[in-house]
């Protein structure tokens, strides 16, 4: 099965995030929205930065897929 390797960027500071997931991209992106559920770098960035930073997680793009 192929798993997505994806990219997102903060709209405020332009920090890049590259992630890999053993789930669908949609499921993983949804998890990034939850402040305490995943502890992901993206979740921490958008939920703990002051002032709040914005990562358009719906525009995450798949860079490639990895086989597991």
Image: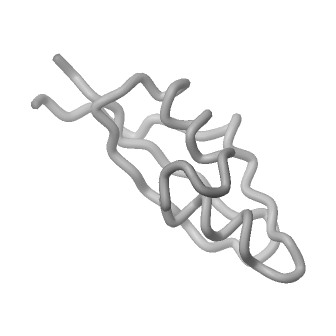
The colouring scheme, among rainbow, by chain, secondary structure or one colour, is one colour
Residue extending farthest left: 68
Residue extending farthest front: 36
Q: Residue at x 20, y 34 (%)?
A: 66
Q: Considering depth in this image, is 60 or 24 the residue closer to the camera?
A: 24
Quarter of the image where the C terminus is located? top left
Quadrant for residue 35, please give it.
bottom right
Residue 63 higher or lower than 51, as above or below: above
Image spot of residue 59 (x, y percent): 68, 38
Image spot of residue 14 (x, y percent): 69, 72
Q: Residue at x 43, y 56 (%)?
A: 18
Q: Residue at x 70, y 35 (%)?
A: 58
Residue extending farthest right: 51
Image spot of residue 20 (x, y percent): 33, 45
Quarter of the image where the N terminus is located? top left
* In the displayed structure image, the side of residue 12 where residue 35 appears, left or right: left
Marks counted in the figure total 0
Q: Considering depth in this image, is 28 or 14 the residue closer to the camera?
A: 28
Quadrant for residue 44, please give it.
bottom right
Residue 5 higher or lower than 16, as above or below: above
* In the displayed structure image, the side of residue 6 where residue 65 appears, left or right: left
Residue 23 higher or lower than 8, as above or below: above
Image spot of residue 16 (x, y percent): 55, 66
Residue extending farthest bottom: 50
């Amino acid at each position: 099965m192929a798993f997505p390797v994806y990219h997102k960027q903060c709209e405020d500071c332009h920090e890049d995030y590259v992630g890999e997931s053993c789930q669908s991209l949609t499921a993983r992106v949804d998890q990034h929205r939850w402040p305490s559920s995943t502890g992901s770098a993206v979740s921490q960035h958008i939920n703990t930065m002051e002032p709040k930073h914005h990562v358009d997680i719906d525009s995450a793009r798949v860079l490639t897929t990895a086989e597991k």
